[in-house]
Image (cartoon, rainbow, N blue to C red):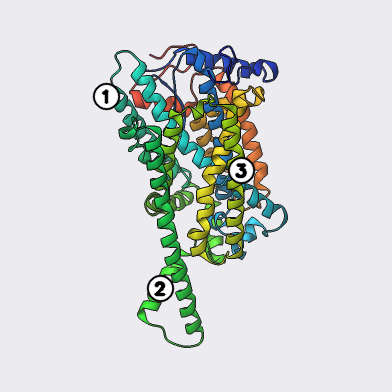
Amino acid sequence: MDEQRASKPAVGGGASAVGGENVRLVTARMDVVAAGEAGESGAVEAGPGEVVPVAPVGAVERMGSMDTLRGVAVLGILAMNMVAFGLPSGAYFNTHNVAVNTYAGAFTGLNSLAWWFNHLLFDQKMMAIFAMLFGAGVVLQDQRSAARAGTAHGSFAGVYYRRLGVLFVLGMVHAYGLWFGDILVGYALCGLLLYPVRKVGPMGLIVMGVVVFLVAVVLNVAVGGMLSAMQSEAERADRLLEAGQEISESQEAIVQAWSQTRYDIMPSATQVEAEVAARRAGWLSNFQINMEITIVAQTEWFWLWTFWRGLGLMLVGMALAKVGFWSARLLTRTYVAAAVCGYAIGLPIIAWGGVLVLERHDDAGFALGVGGQFNYCASVLVALAHASVVMLACKHGLLRGVTARLAAVGRMAFSNYLAQTVLCAVLFFGLGLGYFGSMQRAELWMVVLAVWAIELVWSPLWLARYRFGPAEWLWRSATYGRWQGMRAGREKR
């Protein structure tokens, strides 16, 4: 094993020094899983759209590194999702809208710092990590399936596509029943195209991934340009009307089209107040909002953005799995170089794009088009830098108590992802406490830290007793068509 002693403890295995009794139990459980306690697919369920291969005991470090990274990602994605949970939808895109900032707070001081912190380190970076790990899981599960005597690829295909089908159904329930920001449906749909290319070499996967990924750049720049032109023409028509002049039918159509498309970025005070009132109301009112936004997200936005970014990064993740990136097996200098280059190149590009978008905050088309592509592209570099730092920590046994807890969060990433929705829905929406719109951008970070603490504590405690998180157990049981053994130490029936 490259730069690593075979006798080195598993990632998280050093928890006996600093992690506490529950973390030690979880680590011991990870050893058992790696030794071969798995279902028919030869894989242990881990997180949204992800699997961890069952491997010989000597590969525990590699499983732990992916679990740890997945734990980082599922916690980190909450930092961005919290904005959509707690504030009017316009807050996610518009920093200077007066109506939105009535609730989000003025874009100064800590509120501005919170936005920049999210923009530089979290926005699109955590989603990129998840997508790449999703692709890596396909490669690793296929490798384990091929290594198992008497296991045909056809059997793996059946399990794989059933898993995606179950993920799709659970994602639809999540999106419409609780929160429009669901990512599971998109992953399930993108994942349909991964199985046929699982045998392609790393370079081929990289090329395909980059090409697919860049399609969204072309589409968004084009749509952004059209949106800017629409906004400009609509504003010109409004000025003519204010001056008492008549406008043409085509101009009138543009004005109407612009008024319908501007809400997400430039909502009126009336629209914002209506959204806040609806969110603070009961489940039926929230269901209606989720339905309206989810339909758009799963149709227009899926084909404009989600599909190309998700599939492209999954292909890249498959390529990196084939060269050992996710297993913490590469040379230390490789990870150091990836981290340094990713931060040194990616962060300035993202910052530059952020400045430009803020300067032209009243130009919706620019934010979606040219301005948005700085973070769209450079976020991948920062995501790989984040991943490299985690791989270095796992490779050299750094912060073992922390990585053990993060690995537990990662093993239950599906459950923790859904738990975040439940906790935030209860806190912010009218079906619970109804605090929607009551916290400014900076104040939402108190909730983020509280949820992080809850999941870092409950995940090791749960896994000390049970083989899977509750959502992973349901997903696995539905995939195989029978209830899976849940208690730790109990074989699947």
Q: Please name the residue shown 46% across and 53% down the image.
A: 289
On the image, which quarter does residue 448 sit in? Answer: top right
Q: Amino acid at mark 2?
A: Ile
In the rendered structure, the answer to whether residue 226 lies left or right of residue 107 reads left
> From mark 2 to mark 1, how far is it between C-alphas?
53 Å
Residue 48, compared with residue 296, is above or below; it is above
Q: Amino acid at mark 3?
A: Tyr
Q: Which residue is mark 2?
A: 254
Q: Nearer the viewer, mark 3 or mark 1?
A: 3
> From mark 3 to mark 1, how far is it between C-alphas?
42 Å
On the image, which quarter does residue 137 sit in? Answer: top left
Question: Which quarter of the rendered picture does the C terminus lie within?
Answer: top left
Report the number of discs.
3
Badge 3: few (under 14), some or many (20 or more) residues near its Cα, within 10 Å? many
Q: Nearer the viewer, mark 2 or mark 3?
A: 3
* Earlier sequence position, callout 2 versus callout 1: 1
Q: Which residue is mark 3?
A: 343
Q: Which residue is mark 1?
A: 154
> From mark 2 to mark 3, how far is it between C-alphas?
42 Å
Badge 2 element:
helix
The answer to whether one can see residue 50 in this image is no
